[in-house]
Image (cartoon, rainbow, N blue to C red):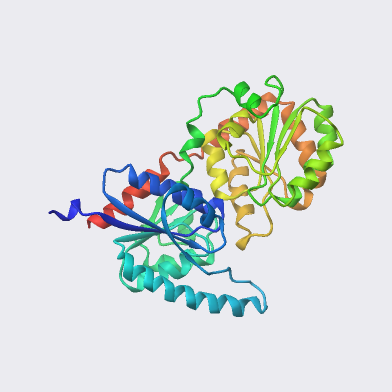
Amino acid sequence: MKQTNKVKHIIISGGGTGGHLFPAIAIAQALEKSGTQVNILFVGAKGKIEEEKLPALGYNFELLDIVGFQRKLTFKNVIFFIKLFKSIAKSKKIIKKFKPDVAVGVGGYASGPLLRVVGKKGIPYILQEQNSYPGITNKLLAAKAEKICVAYDEMQRFFPDEKILKTGNPVRETLRETVETQAEAKQFFGLNPNKKLILSLGGSLGAKTINESIAGGLGKIIDADISVLWQTGKFYIEDCKAEAGQYKSDNVKVTAFISRMDLAFKAADLVISRAGAGTISELCLLEKATILVPSPNVAEDHQTKNAKALAETGATVLVKDKNAKEKLVPKALELMKNNGKLKELSENISKHAVRNSAGIIADELLKIVKK
């Protein structure tokens, strides 16, 4: 049998958040559609979103007991190093058993120890850097990477130019497959199909500042006769429901989590969101007018850098977290009155979209295996 017909063993490493996991799943799905026989193993972090989502999708996976490094003097970093050494030991066992032909790191806690071991064993790997400003892990792993797949221009500031491949960030294909009209999408959530709609997103855990800003401006949104689909995250749902309950308005739908994100995006005339790289890529592909409120509590402040990269080209409106309670809702209402500005934002953000990102990354992985 020829080598090309052999099943390719591929590790996809990383996760910790939906922003890391969903691109990983998109790459896996692209590999499965490639026509090449593949055996895929996910390596993620214990106690994170992958532990819940991967079993439901039927993927094989291993979990490392790993946490992030704190950039200040704290006892937690003693725990970090203990868990790091244990994760490296477990990674060695995983690689010995699975015998990968190639690996890809999508960022997140688990990618560091796993790819460190992969590199030491001479197994080729690719990095997928989602942000405009890379984290420490990918900077350290770049030296031995075959390719570094990026979503932003000018990444040669951080990585060797000859290794960089601009692929964009893989997104969930289901977001683009919806056939419902915008009016039907609004009706799905029990909202008036004839009223404009703001979609407020906080991720699965929620965004405290965005939730507080929406709560503080809810009366103004209702007075403007605008609907709001308010995804609060699981930690804030009760407080936000209580806030919305004071108004008894049919214009407000409050939910901890949205399972049909395809319909939520379709329904939205304006999206309010944090500035995670995965979410931004989805907004670009779906051409959604957006206000970004970057989280200040992420490594390297990369969300602010992501948002600035778009705002500088007129592709989004940037509201700083510290100013959100005062400025977010007034800015949203200002935009909702201006159809021309909404259209301009939609057109400009679409220019940043890179299509078939997952397919391009899958092709690169298979090229490396064939070498």
Task: Give how far across and how far down residue 59 sits, in percent.
Answer: 41, 52
User: Is residue 86 found left or right of 146 in the rendered image?
Assistant: right
Task: Give how far across and how far down residue 328 sits, in percent.
Answer: 76, 41
What residue is at 40 percent from the left and 48 percent from the top?
27
Residue 260, quarter of picture: top right
Instruction: Count the numbered circles shown.
Output: 0
What residue is at 48 percent from the left and 36 percent from the top?
174
User: Is residue 110 found left or right of 229 in the rendered image?
Assistant: left
What residue is at 65 percent from the left and 26 percent from the top?
186
Residue 342, quarter of picture: top right
Taking depth in this image into account, of 350 and 74 the one nearest to the observer is: 74
Compared with 317, 142 (above or below) is below
Residue furthest left in the image = 1
Residue furthest top in the image = 194
User: Is residue 42 found left or right of 316 in the rendered image?
Assistant: left
Task: Give how far across and how far down residue 282 sits, in percent.
Answer: 54, 40
Compared with 340, 314 (above or below) is below
What residue is at 67 percent from the left and 51 percent from the top?
294
Q: Is residue 131 visible?
A: no
Taking depth in this image into account, of 241 and 212 the one nearest to the observer is: 241
Task: Give how far across and how far down residue 242 sits, in percent.
Answer: 83, 42
Residue 313, quarter of picture: top right
- Quarter of the N terminus within the rendering: bottom left
Residue furthest right in the image = 246
Taking depth in this image into account, of 184 and 358 the one nearest to the observer is: 184
Compared with 302, 95 (above or below) is below
Q: Is residue 35 visible?
A: yes
- Quarter of the C terminus within the rendering: bottom left
